Image (tube, rainbow, N blue to C red):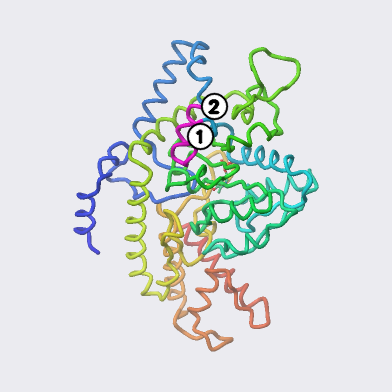
Amino acid sequence: MDRGIAQRLDLADPLALSRSQFNVEESGPIYLDGNSLGRPAKVVIERLADAVRDWSENLVGGWSRWIDLPAAVGDRIGRLIGAGPGQVVVCDSTTVNLYKLAASALAARADRQVILADAHDFPTDRYVLQGLAESTGFELRLLEGSVVDGLDTDVVAGAIGAQTALVCLSHVNFRSGARLDVAAITEAAHRHGALVLWDLCHSAGAFPVALDDNGVDLAVGCTYKYLNGGPGSPAFAYVRRDLQAELRQPIWGWFGQHDQFSMAPIYQPDGGMSRFLTGTPPVLGLLGVDAAAEILESAGIRALWAKSERCTEMLVDLVRARAARCHLGQSIRSGTSRCTRVGGPRPGLAVVQRAHRSPSGGRRFPTTGRDQTGPGSALLALRGHLRRSRAHGRNPRSRCARCPRPARGHVRDALTHKLPTHGRRSHGSRLRRRMLTGLRIQDRE
Ligand SMILES: Cc1ncc(COP(=O)(O)O)c(C=O)c1O
């Protein structure tokens, strides 16, 4: 693979023109970060400026145009995730929507006892379910599986039983990009009368999802990653039409109220999807999502996915060719079972990513060292380790002092969290500590 081949592929790319719709500085970084934020599209910037003008000129009069945005933008997102109109609203954060829908599902299956989830799911999903389990008395069972390959469909199906109230899973693993089988798992849950809630944060806008066709009950997802809605843009919630009247969500706000402006003394939820709204919608965020999702819609989610697969395979080939030099080529993963992501040899990016402190000294937010994620950061980490090993006179190809394995094997194990102990915890922990310390030193370089 050389630059000429890539340029020829670009020339033949039916989506090449879409690039000009985004704010991309040609001299800027190559942005491959799948965590937390897509790029801004030019139309989003214009739409937000128009909205601020509208607000300045029309003040509260703007609400006649804004009040139905949660449903209207929800319908647009619905078209990207295979949901017919009237089943998606855009509001709140993914965390809050997950809480609302999971709580509604548990209330609808109150005669059962068990919530099933993935032990390696995104923390907020696990925390929300832990909190719900504690407050409702349901038992939360976290299924163990491979982070790299995702939960096995048969393992999930085998864990579902007559006592299962809710199966709550991410469609795509946030670390490895491993994709679960929505159709098979949803079908298995329905066989036992359980409800299924899918977190689509890493699938919505990235590849085709077919909620209606797969009979999915509930889904949530964010709009700031592949949907490019902007920092903190509101999330979406999907409830299958025939379930809407049955489910009661726990946050009784005035936007969920039937005939909202009658200001009735008693809460009575709206008959349709609006019952899953809570308070005043975040108008600027909604307008950003609407404009950005329009671009994806016109490009066509299938065409985007086809290109994404081609780009991913190309990246994997390039990384494999380089990784082979340090004997890690086979651990670089991609393929149809994972999505828009390339998994490096070490699951998780938290240590490799730089931790930046805000100027005000507030929370740390991890970002990647060189505008890269996945293979980039994993390889940076590995390269850093090998460089440091050499600098300290430790040959990475040399034998381990405690066993016949090459030291390189331990480096790989440390990267994948499989630590050698040789009967003593300290050997593996020391190696790992040394690596992590090294990575932090590298971060400060
Ligand atoms: C899979 C998944 N679920 C949930 C969240 C949390 O979403 P929010 O912080 O918008 O509530 C994220 C955030 O990255 C995520 O990746």
Compared across the picture, whether 418 is left or right of 308 comes to right
Q: What residue lies at 71% left-to-right and 57% top-to-bottom?
A: 161
Residue occupying image coordinates x 40% and y 60%? 376
Q: Nearer the viewer, residue 345 or 398?
A: 345
Q: Estimate the x, y position of residue 255 in percent, counting from the top left.
A: 63, 23
Which comes sooner in the sequence, label 1 or label 2?
Answer: 1
Pointer 2: what residue?
Answer: 282
Q: Secondary structure at mark 1?
A: loop
Residue 382 drawn at (x, y percent): 45, 68
Q: Amino acid at mark 2?
A: Pro
Q: Nearer the viewer, residue 40 or 213?
A: 213
Which amino acid type is shown beneath numbered disc 1?
Ser
Could you tell me which quadrant the C terminus lies in?
bottom left
Q: As displayed, is residue 100 above or below residue 425?
A: above
- Magenta-drawn stretch, dominant element (helix, strand or loop): helix
Residue at x-position 68% and y-position 35%: 247
Quadrant of picture, ligand 1: top right
Residue 436 left/right relative to 33: right
Tell me whether circle 1 and circle 2 mark residues in contact (CB < 8 Å).
Answer: yes
* Vertical placement of residue 83 versus 157, above or below: above
Can residue 82 be found in the magenta stretch? yes
SS type, badge 2 = loop
Q: Is residue 308 above or below residue 269?
A: below
Q: Which residues are magenta?
A: 71-85
Whether residue 410 is in magenta: the answer is no
Q: Which residue is mark 1?
A: 233
